[in-house]
Image (cartoon, rainbow, N blue to C red):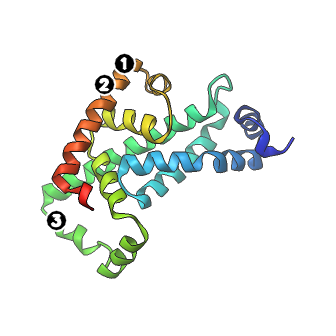
Amino acid sequence: MERSEQSDAVLALKAQNGSRQAFDHLVLRHKTQLFRIARHYVGNSDDASDILQETFVAAWLALKRYDSNRNFATWLRTIALNKCRDFSRRQNVRRNILRFFSILDVREASAPSAEANLEREQTENQRLLALDAAIATLPPTYKQALILTAFAGLSQQEAAVQLGTSAKAIEMKVRRAKQRLEEAVKRLNLDEA
């Protein structure tokens, strides 16, 4: 049986037994979805790439503790969401420290050049970036529910299991997230972008 046809459970068991190739295959299989989750959570691709790397490093290091009775994709998404939350907390702490010491201009001095920004704008869709930024401003509980259902493709029930809540709570959080995004779209005129 080709490795690509093997289930996550089989590959995870092989990886637990030390197969780096099996783990690499799991990375290839799940990296796109996890990247999307991270990008929508934090609002930009560079930070999402860092989070993705942190997620897979953490998964590799925790692999011996992975319970094969659990769904491997769910386990990875949990790690990714934890890394997203950690990133957001670090960003908030950094912002608060900079505000406290009134040195926000240091941050601007280290910002990418206008030329680099132009290249980036040409390669990325501005509307998607603006939407990602709006999603990133959502409260974590709304953001997680929206990302898991709208972007990771989970049902409300699957998202509820992932987040340890009810499907009804997920439905409500997604509805509120969408309402807030509609307001952000109106404020930023994203519908005209």
Q: Circle 1 is placed at which residue position? A: 168
Q: Quadrant of the N terminus?
A: top right
Q: Is residue 2 above or below residue 163?
A: below
Left or right for 125, reference 1: left
Q: Is residue 86 above or below residue 155?
A: below
Tag 2 near tag 1, CB within 8 Å: yes
- Circle 3: is it few (<14), some (14-19), or many (20+) Cα within 10 Å? few
Task: Indicate the position of residue 176 as horizontal and vertical percent values.
Answer: 26, 32
Tag 3 near tag 1, CB within 8 Å: no
Q: Is residue 125 above or below residue 135?
A: below
Q: Secondary structure at mark 3?
A: loop
* Circle nearer the N terminus (2, 3): 3
Q: Circle 2 is placed at which residue position? A: 172
Left or right for 38, reference 179: right
Which sits in the foreground, 23 or 36?
36
Left or right for 95, reference 117: left
Which sits in the foreground, 113 or 126?
126
The residue shown at (16%, 65%) is 103
Considering every residue shown, the one lying at the far front of the view is 192
Q: Secondary structure at mark 2?
A: helix
Q: CA distance from mark 2 to mark 1?
A: 6 Å
Which amino acid is tagged 3?
Answer: Ile
